[in-house]
Amino acid sequence: MKKDYAVRAYRTETKYDTHDDLISLLDVQVPAEALEFLRSAHNAQDSKDVTFTVQVANRTDGDFRKLAFTSKGSKMKDFVPVATLQKWFNAADNLTSLFDMAAFELTLIVEVREAQQGSPELFEEPAAEEGETIPPTMQQGSPPRMAGVLNAPKEMQALPAPEDADIEDADFTVEGGEEGHDPAAD
């Protein structure tokens, strides 16, 4: 199921999350009748494939770009229905420019699909369609955190360090130094 909503930028914030990663939050004003569907889609993120995309259309030349987000929820904020979206920070997104309603038209696209056995893994990137360019942060070899996926399973968030990087067993002896000579005392 796919639904589109004409939205307005309401608030943006860039901050560090609990893991000291820089994230961007974007609150968009949504139609009141969309709140129930947005809450359902937010709650379904664990069991289904749910994508939250903000399409930014330039009113002067018709060009558009899409920003992929994850949902932090939706609620009434100061009597305004708002959906809170989150993504990894990228200065090129220029989220503060989205407040210029004369220059940009925003559309929130929410797509809910059933999770399937053969569906791509969480950090796997879909193949680009012909004529579609992939931004440098989304190309093969870039860290998966740049893909905008914030709701990774806990076992993916806390991977153990490789055994060869065990700091407790590391040898910290200095080669070539004289015994009894402190180089810091020179």
Image (cartoon, rainbow, N blue to C red):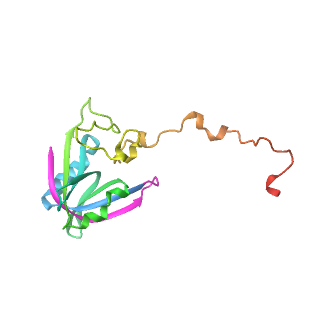
Which quadrant of the view contains residue 155?
Answer: top left
Q: Is residue 45 above or below residue 63?
A: above
Residue range highlighted in magenta: 1-21
Q: Which residue shows up at 24% across the image and 43% down it? A: 132
Relative to 135, does residue 162 appear above or below in the rendering?
A: above
Prevailing SS of the magenta stretch: strand
Q: Nearer the viewer, residue 62 or 153?
A: 62
Which residue appears at 18% of the width and 68% of the height? 102
Q: Is residue 66 visible?
A: yes
- Tell me: 50 left or right of 24: left
x then y, percent, for residue 5: 15, 56
Residue, far top: 118
Residue at image point 80% right, 42% down:
176
Q: Is residue 15 magenta?
A: yes
In which quadrant is the N terminus drawn?
A: top left
Q: Position of residue 76 (x, y in %)?
A: 22, 64
